[in-house]
Image (cartoon, helix red, strand yellow):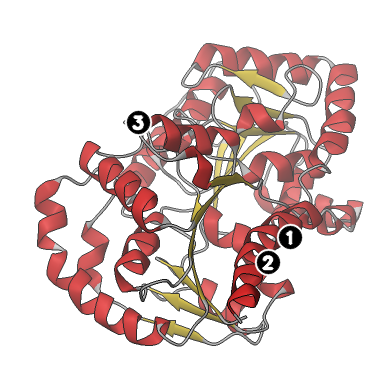
Amino acid sequence: MKILYVDQTGQLGGGELAILPWLRAHPEGAHVVLFEDGPFRPLIEECGIPVDVFTLDTLKGVRRESGVRSILSALPAFASLRGRLARLAAGFDLLYANSQKAFLLAALSKRRGQPLIWHLRDILTAEHFSPILRKLAVFAGNRYASVIIANSHATAESFVAAGGLRHKVRVVHDGIDPRPFDSITPEAIAVLRKEIGSESSPMIGIFGRLSPWKGQHILLEAISAIPGAHAVLIGDALFGESVYAEGLKLRANQPDIAGRVHFLGFRRDIPALMQAMDIIVHASTSPEPFGLVIVEGMLARKPVIATRAGGAIEIIQEGESGMLVTPGSISELRTAIERLLSDPAATERLSRDGRRRAEMFSLEALFQGISTVIGEFKSRDSDLH
């Protein structure tokens, strides 16, 4: 079966990192279209999969919070891109959209009767999207998506609550290969801690792009009251969030935490960096659709503190495989960090049980889920012939 995968960005965001293992394992008949170039493209090409980049900068102005004016101003770009995508899509059996913007364009570009899978990786609530974008996404999903793969039950329920058709939704959790987390040597960890500059102090790692709703500022405020604790921020501003990133750096230079905050930027050695941390924090202030970094931290056998919302509560069993705190609560996060730093037995137990729990979110389960959905269309195609 020839499948055209469509993604809005060439940056390595969560959705791109989540779909990459599937593409590596299933390159046959695959072709990818990106609406922006970036490090995701060469990784796809390494799989032997051809990639087209249809770049239109006007589309970058349409963001989660965009209103009617921004959407209308982007319509000419949408129309131009639709034509290019439609010509390419005509030669494929199935379209697979890996993001919301990609889905909307694929919906307008597909030929009559052509199956379209939307891999929904966003929580469709007012905290994440403007009213017009939510309505547009749900309308298009109900009308044009053949099947909607949701990356968590929280994501699925947000779609249904916004008016989406439940019978179209299939929940398939993201999966991660545990092997890279098991091959890190103590020597490599020691080198990383020395590089960061906090060899003997406790290091609290937070992984992900620098964005207000990802909550890096919450961690900085939490450690301000924990003498000696260091915060390590792994990630960078990806989607026009440079102002927030600069604000974090200004805060990090203030006397109460100066010298205790480390910005590592975008890194590829995530398993090793996670092994080098003492605690891993996921501090999103709004519900996370899934939470890849939560699973990664648990696979690294580190105690994980996450916010009690969205996909995180499907991953962590509170008090058993990790700790959960109220989104946005500096005091709860500080208390959780202090408890782990002062209770080695609890830290060891959470690390051990967290690893066991994380193994449920495997690549095998992910592949089986996606294969089952795609198999629905292979069956229909066989029936027609």
Alpha-carbon distance for marks 3 and 2?
30 Å
Left or right, 141 with reference to 42: left
Mark 1: which secondary structure?
A: helix
Q: Kindly identify the amino acid type of the residue bearing the numbered disc 1.
A: Phe
Q: Is residue 76 above or below residue 122?
A: below
Residue topped by disc 3 = 127
Q: Is residue 324 above or below residue 310?
A: above
Query: Mark 1 or 3 closer to N-term?
Result: 3
Q: What residue is shown at x 76% (from left), y 34% (from top)?
A: 278
Residue topped by disc 2 = 22
Alpha-carbon distance for marks 1 and 3?
31 Å
Find residue 338 and name its label.
none
Q: Can residue 73 be seen in this view?
A: yes
Residue 147 x/y as whole percent: 51, 55
Residue topped by disc 1 = 367
Q: Is residue 101 above or below residue 359?
A: below
Report the quarter where the C terminus lies: bottom right
Query: Mark 1 or 2 closer to N-term?
Result: 2
Q: What residue is shown at x 82% (from left), y 35% (from top)?
A: 357
Q: In which quarter of the image is residue 100?
A: bottom left
Q: Kindly identify the amino acid type of the residue bearing the numbered disc 3.
A: Glu
